[in-house]
């Protein structure tokens, strides 16, 4: 049942974002920033963690989950280091995901030929 919940929740998030992209004139970069900020806000008001427990990877993998990871990292670092934790926590919590995105992006650029849009 965990797989089913992850699948339909992740699909619902993707469908809602697709509707947002189709029905508004928002650029994809702005939508991505909106999702990360929304995940951070939902984490701050402690709504997102029960959602992740229910949906698993369906809620933790999308950009909403990245915002939640940033929030948890900042919160833990502020508790440990005080004011400096604001600047350290997000990087510590998301370092593996950001590093993987950079490495796989670089590997993809070696395999595929980029084409500029005209």
Image (spheres, rainbow, N blue to C red):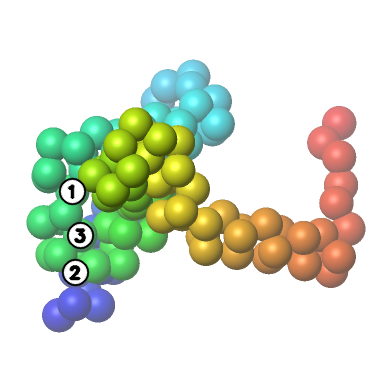
Marks 2,3: beta carbons within 8 A: no
Camera sees residue 67: no
Question: How many neighbours does mark 2 have within 10 angstroms: few (below 14), some (14-19), or many (20 or more)?
Answer: some
Residue drawn where x is 70% and y is 64% of the image:
103
Quarter of the picture holding the N terminus: bottom left
In the image, which disc is placed on residue 48?
1
Q: Secondary structure at mark 2?
A: helix
Residue drawn where x is 40% and y is 25% of the image:
23
Residue drawn where x is 54% and y is 32% of the image:
28
Q: Please give the residue where the numbered disc 3 appears in the rendered image.
A: 52
Q: Quadrant of residue 17?
A: top left
Camera sees residue 38: yes
Horizontal relation, residue 94 to residue 67: left or right: right
Question: How many neighbours does mark 1 have within 10 angstroms: few (below 14), some (14-19), or many (20 or more)?
Answer: many
Q: Which residue is more in the foreground, 46 or 29?
A: 46
Q: Quadrant of residue 31?
A: top left
């Amino acid at each position: 049942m965990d797989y089913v919940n992850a699948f339909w929740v992740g699909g619902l998030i993707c469908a809602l974002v697709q509707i947002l992209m189709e029905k508004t004139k928002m650029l994809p970069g702005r939508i991505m920033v909106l999702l990360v900020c929304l995940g951070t806000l939902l984490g701050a008001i402690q709504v997102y963690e029960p959602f992740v427990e229910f949906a698993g990877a369906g809620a933790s993998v999308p950009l909403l989950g990245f915002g939640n990871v940033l929030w948890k990292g900042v919160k833990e670092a502020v508790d440990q280091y005080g004011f400096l934790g604001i600047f350290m926590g997000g990087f510590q919590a998301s370092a593996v995901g950001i590093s993987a995105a950079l490495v796989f992006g670089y590997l993809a650029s070696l395999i595929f030929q980029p084409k500029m849009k005209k």
